[in-house]
Image (cartoon, coloured by chain):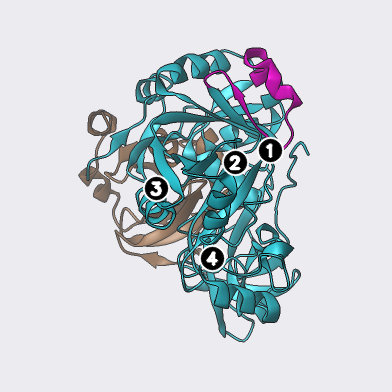
Chain colours: A brown, B cyan
Amino acid sequence: MKYTKDHEWLRVEGDLIVVGITEHAATQLGDVVFVELPEIETMVTAGDEVVVIESVKAASDILAPVDGEIVAVNDLLSDSPGLVNEDPTGAAWFFKVKVDDLSVLDDFMDEDEYAEMIE
Amino acid sequence: MNLSRLGLHDLHQSLGGKMVPFAGYEMPVQYPTGVMKEHLHTRTAAGLFDVSHMGQIILRPRDTMQELALAFESLMPVDVAGLAEGRQRYGLLTNDTGGILDDLMFANRGDHLFVVVNAACKAADLAHLADHLAGVAEVEPLDRALLALQGPQAETALARVVPGVAAMRFMDVGIFGDLWVSRSGYTGEDGFEISLPQSKAEALARALLDMPEVLPIGLGARDSLRLEAGLCLYGHDITDRTSPVEAGLTWAIPKVRRAGGERAGGFAGEARILHELAEGPERRRVGLRPDGRAPMREGTALFDENGTPLGEVTSGGFGPSVGAPIAMGYVAAGHATPGTTIEGDVRGKRLPATICPLPFHPTTYKR
């Protein structure tokens, strides 16, 4: 698993990257009440706002960590946004993105580096 | 900006409160329980809120209570002179153009009035009161703590410490030694607000928190509770530009202060307020239920189905007891009827919402 400075986790699944938010981020957000997911087949550029998460406190954006095409989104979150708090690194993935080259992941933090960042 | 600390700051930290700046104070926005559960706990058991940031003021008449009451009535379109001893009322300080300077609670305590005002307004309120009441009253700001215990089990919990409170009804006030208790609050639930010396606040807070019914509740849940109860937040739902009539607070303006009443008019902003009472305001505060799950937050622009601007959301979020997004805002009066469908602009998308009656969650005051 790799991590971004924006508290996303990135997991490789075949030739796709699965994206979600970390336990730390989910705790900071508080109770999530709404998730707005992107359309499938959207081409995104790293830094694009692709997901909106609303907690009881405020709205936050999730940014595309890499360039690529959104090929799947987790529709479960539309009806059960609370999954983001219950299982942020498992059931509550947000989207899967197809990239040209998985080596883009080399630029991101590993678990130890992320743990150090949030200390 | 220098933030003030509450007298109970250390207690909030030891309880794991997440402290944020609010109205010049470091305040707990939530505890480890989290906003959602804190909200629901208050609706089913009892929640303890530290609202010591609010302004507490005594108005002591120089001559008679009647003279003070009438002078205070020149600042608010409400009935002060008719308030019985031991009772509290909701009041609104208005400006000359009929806008709201602050909303407050005032209590008749026999030989003086006790007033509780919003934290962000207290300096301005004190100046305003001193300016206008100096001839008839001494205006004394107090440095006391203020705790609120709210929820269906608030009476059971507080009565263990102060047995006398069980006999109080909604908006009664009573003095129990050092504790000044009112049966009121800002959640839509039955409950109490307790003013007490700073030196005694921690002991009472700990005694209440030791009870199985009581959890500490932060500002986050305070906001969602009051929104579900349809209660206004000053600076958001009411401001120095909104009138009490637009805000739907006409229940606070009794007949005696309206046209034809015994003490009609004679308050700041009388021209606009009496005009709006007679003719209806141009816009009205309404409740809104977004049709989907996306909350409509403060500032969300509102439109009719043809895209004509109607107004905007002044408070919005998710209602944990409602189980859906809820909002309040102002719309043109012709679109204020419950059942009307309008649209809100959420991140560039026009999403439907339905005007609905307030409150969103039924209130359970002990009348």
* Mark 3 element type: helix
- Residue type at mark 3: give it: Lys
Residue most extreme to the front: B63
- Counting residues from the start of the chain, the first of labels 1 and 4 encountered is 1
Q: Mark 1 points at which residue?
A: B189
Residue stretch in magenta: B157-178
- The numbered dot on residue B107 is 2
| Real-space CA distance between mark 1 and mark 4, rounded to the nearest whole angstrom | 24 Å
Which residue corresponds to the image point at 47% horizontal and 70% vertical from the top-left? B241
Query: Which image quadrant is residue B335 in?
Result: bottom right
Mark 2 nearby-residue class (10 Å; few <14, some 14–19, many ≥20): many
* Mark 2 element type: strand
- When the figure is inspected, residue B175 is found, relative to residue A38, above or below; the finding is above
Whether residue B302 is visible, yes or no, is no
Q: Are marks 2 and 3 in contact (CB under 8 Å)?
A: no
Q: Give the percent coordinates (x, y) of residue B252.
A: 66, 57
| Real-space CA distance between mark 4 and mark 3, rounded to the nearest whole angstrom | 26 Å
| Real-space CA distance between mark 1 and mark 3, rounded to the nearest whole angstrom | 25 Å
Q: Name the residue under label 3.
A: B122
Q: Name the residue under label 4.
A: B313
- Counting residues from the start of the chain, the first of labels 1 and 3 encountered is 3
In this picture, residue B167 sits left or right of residue B224: right
Q: Give the percent coordinates (x, y) of residue B297.
A: 51, 60
- Counting residues from the start of the chain, the first of labels 2 and 1 encountered is 2
- Residue type at mark 2: give it: Ala
Q: Do labels 4 and 3 share a chain?
A: yes
Mark 1 against mark 4, which lies toward the viewer? 1
- Residue type at mark 1: give it: Glu
Q: Do the residues labelled 1 and 3 touch (CB within 8 Å)?
A: no
Q: Mark 1 lies on which chain?
A: B
